[in-house]
């Protein structure tokens, strides 16, 4: 019978990819805090217990009767739960090479909402946009498990660490709404939005990386049009060096629909967030959510 260490490795090694040992050890410390009912151990199962806790037995009992593919799915669900428990305060995802989560995600270590909510995300499109000599990488991910969702603690973060959005931005919002090619609610330009300073990673992006990335959002409309569309169950990641911006479509379930958003509004919100949160050394990232909760916009660090 496998130890939890082996079970966790198995969850990530279906494609013969390896997980760093420190990632597994870190997960073990988190699982020790997780409330998980444990069946009474049989004599031959006692050796599953690690360090005086029952976490290995707990996981084993959850998956021992399932097929191999279901075992992988359950273990990934467990790791996703742990990730969501600590997304605002830990660097859990920094331990992982995202490429081990499937054939799809080959980028560096990320602490994004999309990949945290949906570690099985697959890359459906990836391009490089040259803006004033700077290469901006644009990647679109699809979540086959339909797990993209809003954070439960979003309102509390806004209350404690708000980004001040001036009234003058309302003029931009009204202009942007007129730029949409679709009607509301698919058109999200001009939607009232609140932003908060967050700490998705221990360190903020380096140097002027975010400034360059945010400035590029003013040029991209000249190349690709004033708006962009993010399909259901997908999120779009823009990256320059150590800085990334992610737009996640959270309109799942009944309101499963594409969302259209404006580049210059994204630029304005991310610019304010960068100034209030990163440049003022308040936090390592920022997160913006509209009043209707249909999407999330995030500014954070990636490994470059």
Image (cartoon, rainbow, N blue to C red):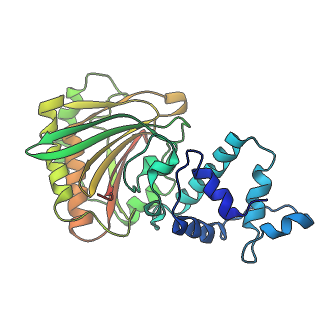
Q: Please, is residue 18 above or below residue 125 in the view?
A: below
Asked if residue 23 lies left or right of residue 278, the reply is right
Q: Nearer the viewer, residue 39 or 181?
A: 39
Question: In this orientation, which residue lies closer to the viewer: 163 or 234?
Answer: 234
Residue 13 in the image: above or below residue 31: above
In the image, residue 110 sits, relative to residue 28, either above or below, namely: above
26 or 260, nearer to the observer: 26
Residue at position x 29%, y 49% in the image: 245
Towards the viewer: 265 or 177: 265
In the image, residue 184 sits, relative to residue 94, either above or below, namely: above
Going by the picture, which residue comes out furthest to the right?
Answer: 43
Q: Residue at x 76, y 77 (%)?
A: 52
**81 relative to 257 in the view: left or right:** right
| Outermost residue toward the bottom in this view | 52
How far across and how far down the image is residue 260, in percent? 31, 30
Q: Residue at x 40, y 29 (%)?
A: 231
Describe residue 73's horizontal placement relative to residue 280 as left or right.
right
Point out residue 240 in the picture as x, y percentages from the top left corner: 22, 51
**Residue 221 at x, y percent in the picture:** 16, 34
């Amino acid at each position: 019978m496998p130890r939890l260490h082996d079970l966790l490795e198995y969850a990530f090694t279906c494609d013969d990819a390896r997980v760093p040992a420190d990632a597994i050890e870190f997960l073990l410390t988190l699982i020790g805090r997780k409330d998980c009912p444990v069946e009474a151990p049989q004599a031959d199962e006692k050796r599953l217990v690690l360090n005086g806790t029952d976490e290995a037995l707990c996981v084993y009992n959850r998956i021992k009767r399932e097929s191999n593919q279901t075992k992988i799915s359950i273990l990934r669900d467990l790791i996703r739960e742990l990730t969501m428990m600590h997304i605002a305060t830990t660097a859990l995802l920094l331990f992982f090479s995202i490429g081990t989560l499937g054939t799809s995600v080959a980028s560096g270590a990320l602490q994004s909402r999309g990949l945290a909510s949906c570690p099985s995300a697959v890359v459906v499109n990836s391009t490089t946009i040259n803006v004033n000599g700077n290469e901006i990488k644009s990647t679109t991910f699809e979540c086959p498990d339909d797990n993209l969702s809003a954070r439960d603690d979003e309102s509390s973060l806004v209350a404690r660490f708000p980004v001040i959005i001036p009234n003058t931005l309302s003029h931009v919002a009204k202009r942007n709404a007129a730029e949409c090619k679709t009607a509301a609610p698919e058109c999200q330009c001009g939607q009232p939005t609140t932003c908060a300073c967050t700490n998705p990673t221990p360190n903020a992006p380096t140097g002027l990386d975010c400034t360059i990335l945010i400035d590029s959002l003013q040029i991209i409309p000249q190349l690709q049009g004033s708006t962009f569309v993010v399909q259901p169950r997908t999120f779009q990641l823009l990256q320059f060096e150590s800085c990334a911006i992610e737009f996640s479509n959270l309109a799942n379930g009944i309101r499963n629909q594409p969302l259209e958003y404006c580049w210059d509004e994204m630029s304005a919100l991310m610019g304010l967030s960068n100034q209030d949160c990163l440049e003022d050394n308040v936090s390592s990232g920022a997160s913006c959510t509209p009043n209707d909760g249909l999407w999330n916009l995030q500014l954070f660090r990636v490994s470059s």
